[in-house]
Image: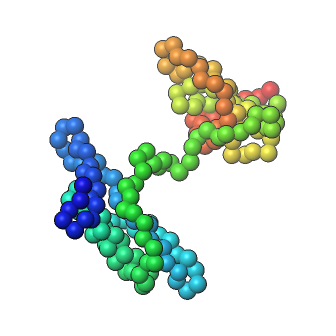
Amino acid sequence: MSDTNNTPKRRGRKKIADGGKPSPRQIYCVCAAVIGGNLVQDDVHCTDGDKDTPDSALVEEAKSLFNTDHGQDPTSVKGPYFQRKGVNTKGHRDTLNVNMEEINLIPVKLATAVYKGWNVSVRFIDGRDDAVYIIYKTHTKEDKKTKPSNKVVRIDALEDLEEASV
């Protein structure tokens, strides 16, 4: 897949099933240069070309945009790349990977809450104000569902958090 001057082309983006617009995945290049003794690296978002736009045109556009932003041509340009699918828009995951043998649960501080449609018991973790250990009880809807395994989650992912007295 190349045009007459041997510049490789990007593959065309898939159309939506109903014949609508193509998916809005952003195209970008990674540009880097040493400016004032510091390494400056930037993801430069290119305009969205069609499937016939050669990669070399996108690289030249990225160089021009980097020069406009930083006042110097980049010494290195990598790409073009598509933005990864499934980018996490929340900025963090709800669940945390924690070694259960290394955490201490506070026995006298308990609570109840709702987590992703499940009524859960909440156990607070000693030394962690941002995370709790949850135990699944019942689903908020009456349909029968298999209980997920207990886990450590961020406290801000819980809804209707109510502390219980022991």
The picture quadrant where one finds residue 4 is bottom left
Residue at 64 percent of width and 24 percent of height: 149
The picture quadrant where one finds residue 43 is bottom left
Residue in the foreground of this view, choosing between 9 and 122: 9
Quadrant (top left/top right/bottom left/bottom right) for the C terminus = top right
Q: Is residue 104 visible?
A: yes
Residue at 70 percent of width and 33 percent of height: 133
Residue at 63 percent of width and 35 percent of height: 161
Relative horizontal placement of residue 23, taking residue 121 as reference (left or right)? left
Q: Is residue 48 visible?
A: no
Which of the colour schemes (rainbow, by chain, secondary structure, one colour) is used? rainbow
Task: Determine whether 149 is above or below 75 in the image.
Answer: above
Relative horizontal placement of residue 132, taking residue 159 as reference (left or right)? right
Residue in the foreground of this view, choosing between 150 and 82: 82
Residue 131, position in %: x, y?
A: 69, 41
Residue at 80 percent of width and 34 percent of height: 101
Residue in the foreground of this view, choosing between 165 and 86: 86
